[in-house]
Image (cartoon, rainbow, N blue to C red):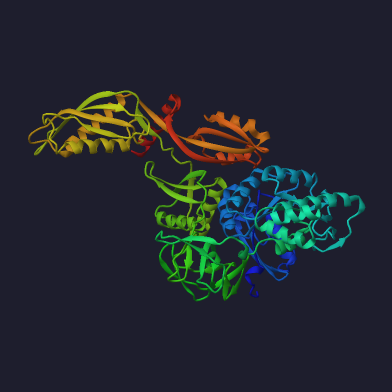
Amino acid sequence: MKEYAIDRIRNIALIGHGGSGKTILTDAMLLNSGAVTRIGRIEDGTTVSDYHADEIERQISINATLATTEYKDTKFNILDTPGYSDFVGEVLSSLRVADTALLVLKAVEGVEVGSELVWRHAEREELPTVILVNKIDNEHADFDTVVEQVRKRFGHRAVAVQFPVRQGPAFREIVDILRMKMLVYKGDGSGACEEKDIPPELRERAEAAREALIEQIAESSEELMNRFFEEGTLGEKDLTDGLRTAVVQREIIPVFCLSALQNIGVSRIMDFIRDFCPAPSDRPAVRTTLPDGGGEVALIPDPEREPVAFVFKTLSEPHVGELSLFRVYQGKILSGLDLVNYSTGKPERINQIFVLRGKDRKEVTHLNAGDIGAVVKLKDTHTNNTLAAKGFPVLIAPIVFPEPLTTGAIKPRAKGDEDKIGNGLHSLHEEDPSFMVRVDTDTRETLILGQGEIHLDVMLKRLKQRFGVDVDLKPPRIPYRETIRKPADVSYKHKKQTGGAGQYGEVYIKLEPKPRGEGYEFVDAIVGGVISNKFIPAVDKGIQEQMSKGVVAGYPIVDVKVTLYDGSQHSVDSNEISFKIAAQQAFKKGVLEGNPVLLEPIYNIEVLIPDEFMGDVMGDISSHRGKILGMESEGPFQVIRAKVPLAELHQYATRLRSITQGRGIFRRSFSHYEEVPQEIMTKIIEEAAAQKEENA
């Protein structure tokens, strides 16, 4: 692969709802560039992007895949991203290093919930965006309706630069507004097309569409607007230059029509990307911070400056090991170069450098500023790390991955596998930071957290395949809390006489409930020295130890004020352990007299769904003890806000997907603790008692 100047590089991320055709579009682009000889099939596992075993098995994209190719003297770095919300972390990492987002929509369904989600992520990265209405060859395709949806949802910057002559299985011709020609495709999958004059019956529509495009371009610049008013139109050069500037500056969102599977319209989109979409040098300078927090540095995409690269994804490949995918933001990255990982402060040597096309790798000697590639066997570098020259300490802002939506508890099937499991889970987290591992100190379980049940299932399969360990996944124990509802006044005398030194300690304590969230308070109200000062800390410690163990169901106790106001001691037999035991027993007695109750975590959820599923989703939330807080419209979607007990959210991602035919998404965040209903509390206490007996 030859070396390309920075203005001949295009970094593009394909984003969209699951099933919109991004993976097939990637293959079609590679076919048009001569990189492959045919478009693969998802069903056969023969596409370039979806080459991992789990992707072939599930027939969906799970990983973001880099496919580099050359097209008309331009280097395309294509990032094909998953459409399932479970794998949104892959989308975020790809958008961070792309210069253009291609949002792929279906010609029948139009703007879907997943489309909306990835659109927002692209907006956050301030990426120029091109919208591709795919599958125009499907029955009931409706390009005009989708364009109208796009303009309603994403604003009037969106403007069609093409329209199909016929839709459905007869789709072969496209009227191109920029060229003012009709593109007639052979329909044999080759992508070959012939330019013809626009038929008279379509001429009026084409001219109206061109006029709308010219007006949109004129509105993007004051200079062009003045020229448009003076001359009534824009010349060809103004039109071309104005459109490129407007796309780069995100003033215009062009909308195309295509069938990726039939390779109709794809080459024209590639021409547009080459001619009108930004090169890395057209994008704003990346701002970096200094590791010591001492200011900012702007990176200049110039190969002659100090090298700086950002690792946006980590892959583990068989027979190769760990591949770190990176983008060069400044300077030049060469094989054998010594850099510093300023995220960790550790040195790294760049070994083999590759450009990737799915699973195929081609070794290169270097990559210049603006380019994307991969390096193998870095010692201690992971996703979100910045590599830069010695003496040039900079940090690129890390990708912010979403909070997890699903949690599971894992249990090893074989004893002695704990270390292998821990190392494997850590490695999987390094690959995909949206997958997390945590040990819950309350329930003493190892928890895995992700974006959905499919996400967790994929990770556990990888754990088995790569690290040879099997685990069982079960619902996590809910981190309930215990507290009291009324004051209690209790005492306990601990007295133990055996041969030798005895034990003696007596305490009188008052327990009072505190407002939710205020925690534990210990008050020493001893007067007259009835308990020596040296034993009082033992009373406090004993109570806190018992609080951590719970009383009614084994869950930590919260929001209690304990006042130690009286007691007695023995001149010989009293010691710290005696008062600790007395305090624990008194506290247990006080909790049981204080009308104890269990508290459960309540979560805020926000569900984004198409309007037709609103009744079913609200009914499901209500049937799982949820409280609807409100709802509002967002275009064709409804946003439902509710509070739901965590115990009812297990497998909610799967439930929501089933109710909404895969078209609903949700977010969740912790809200507060509140009392568990009596009948559920009784059941939890019974289960805890049975578990305790079983473990005894």
Q: Is residue 468 visible?
A: no
Residue occupying image coordinates x 33% and y 29%:
514
Q: Residue at x 43, y 62 (%)?
A: 290
Between residue 182 and residue 1, name the one nearer to us: 182
- Rendered location of residue 585, percent (x, y): 24, 31
Q: Check the image and name the residue furthest to the front.
A: 230
Question: Which residue is most to the left?
Answer: 571
Where residue 626 appears, as percent x and y from the top left, is 53, 30
Number of numbered discs overlaid on the protein picture: 0
Closer to the camera in the image, 211 or 39? 211
Tell me if 564 is positioned left or right of 32 in this view: left
Eyeballing the image, is 253 above or below 650? below
* Residue 607 figure quarter: top right
Q: Given the current orientation, which residue lies at the most extreme right position?
A: 200
> In which quadrant is the C terminus drawn?
top left
- Lateral position of residue 346 relative to residue 45, left or right: left
Q: Residue at x 88, y 50 (%)?
A: 204
At 69% from the left and 52% from the top, the residue drawn is 104
Tell me if residue 640 comes above or below residue 474 in the rendering: above
Residue 209 appearing in the image: yes
Say if 647 sits above or below 366 in the image.
above
Which of 435 and 370 lies nearest the eye of the viewer? 370
Residue 512 spot, x, y in % from top left: 29, 26
Give the percent coordinates (x, y) of residue 412: 44, 50
Apparent side of residue 544 relative to residue 92 in the rendered image (left or right)? left
- Location of residue 21 with respect to 6 vertically, above or below: above
Q: Is residue 382 left or right of residue 178?
A: left
Location of the N terminus (image quadrant): bottom right
